[in-house]
Image (spheres, rainbow, N blue to C red):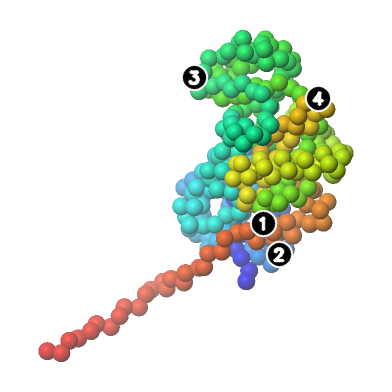
Amino acid sequence: MPLHIGVLCSEPPTEGDDTAALDGRSAQDLAESIRRLGHRATVIPADDELSLALALRREVLDGCLLATHGDLGGSGRLQAQLRRCCLPHVGPSAAAVTLAYDKLRARDRLSRCNLPVPTSLAFGAGLQTPRRELAYLGWPAILKPRRGSLGRGVLRLESAQEIADLVDDELAHGGEILVERATQGVEVQVVLLDGVVLGAMQVERSRDLQEIEAMTCPPDLSTSMLHGLEHLARHAADALDLGRGICRVDILVSDRHNEQILEVEALPPLHRDGVVARIARAAGIPHPRLVELLLGGLPRVERLEVPSRPEMAAPAFLPA
């Protein structure tokens, strides 16, 4: 039976809004693959809560796919709103998405599960800048937003003073950030579907970390090393309750240090040219088949046929 799937994304992007542009690409590619599978797809802007609620009531949907990245998807509010509407969606719960999006809480959870994460300092929420700790952290170092994804706001810093100045500037604007020591190594992104590893991609970034310059699938690593990274990724996803849908675990592999889990992305981009789709193709899974596998994990809810004008029961007359 054909399904009607809502694909949630942000509004059309303004100039320079890379996250919204990525949302649009993911949404269009997902909608196209859904239609190629013989289902109906409706792309729904999800920025405004009231407009989204009206759209969800207007459309008769069997479920939703989220093509949202950044705060819109990572905050968990969309998942929570869908749950209030009793509308199933592909992917993890609101609580799991919110936890993974918060790097400080996610790293604390991973560390408690004996999984390796970078040594980092957290600033914000009224905390004073500990300049002494910054000096001991070492440099170069990496500054990241506490809540963020897709490398947005990530900076490479070369000196302790540069770190302190930028930290003070971020905190003055109400930001919450993490600073961690930069480590030389190879970045490997492992993609999982419903807790099962699809594959891995070796990623090479520009020096300022803002651009991906090259991708290699499978990574140029030994088989034993890849198996170890896949094992690590499965444990990381399990620790963060990301066993439903697609997730991506970014791991730094270094010759001088143990592997480090840099980030766990609960809502990775799903457009045809992204890391997830490329890894799936390398595993023999074209984009429509990938979407079909995702929809296979969608909880099915039977529709209730409610008559527009319910018939009134005939009055019962008791004998006198």
Q: Nearer the viewer, mark 1 or mark 2?
A: 1
Label 4 sits on residue: 256
Of residue 275 and residue 193, the one placed in the foreground of this image is 193
Instruction: Return the disc, 3 or 1, that comes first in the chain's sequence.
Output: 3
Do the CB atoms of the residues marked 3 and 1 lie less than 8 Å apart? no
Would you say 51 lies left or right of 308 here? right
Q: CA distance from mark 2 to mark 4?
A: 47 Å
Amino acid marked by disc 4:
Arg
- Kind of element beneath mark 1: helix
Instruction: Return the disc, 4 or 3, that comes first in the chain's sequence.
Output: 3
Q: Is residue 119 above or below residue 297?
A: above
Instruction: Return the disc, 1 or 4, that comes first in the chain's sequence.
Output: 4
- Kind of element beneath mark 4: loop
- Kind of element beneath mark 3: loop
Q: Residue furthest front?
A: 114
Q: Nearer the viewer, mark 3 or mark 2?
A: 3
Label 1 sits on residue: 294
Amino acid marked by disc 2:
Leu
Do the CB atoms of the residues marked 4 and 3 lie less than 8 Å apart? no
Q: Residue at x 57, y 54 (%)?
A: 89
Q: CA distance from mark 3 to mark 1?
A: 41 Å
Q: Residue at x 80, y 36 (%)?
A: 203
Q: Residue at x 63, y 69 (%)?
A: 2
Label 3 sits on residue: 126
Label 2 sits on residue: 37
Instruction: Return the disc, 3 or 2, that comes first in the chain's sequence.
Output: 2
Q: Residue at x 66, y 40 (%)?
A: 236
Amino acid marked by disc 1:
Leu
Note whether residue 203 is visible: yes
**Other residues around mark 1 within 10 Å, as few (<14) / some (14–19) / many (≥20):** some
- Kind of element beneath mark 2: loop
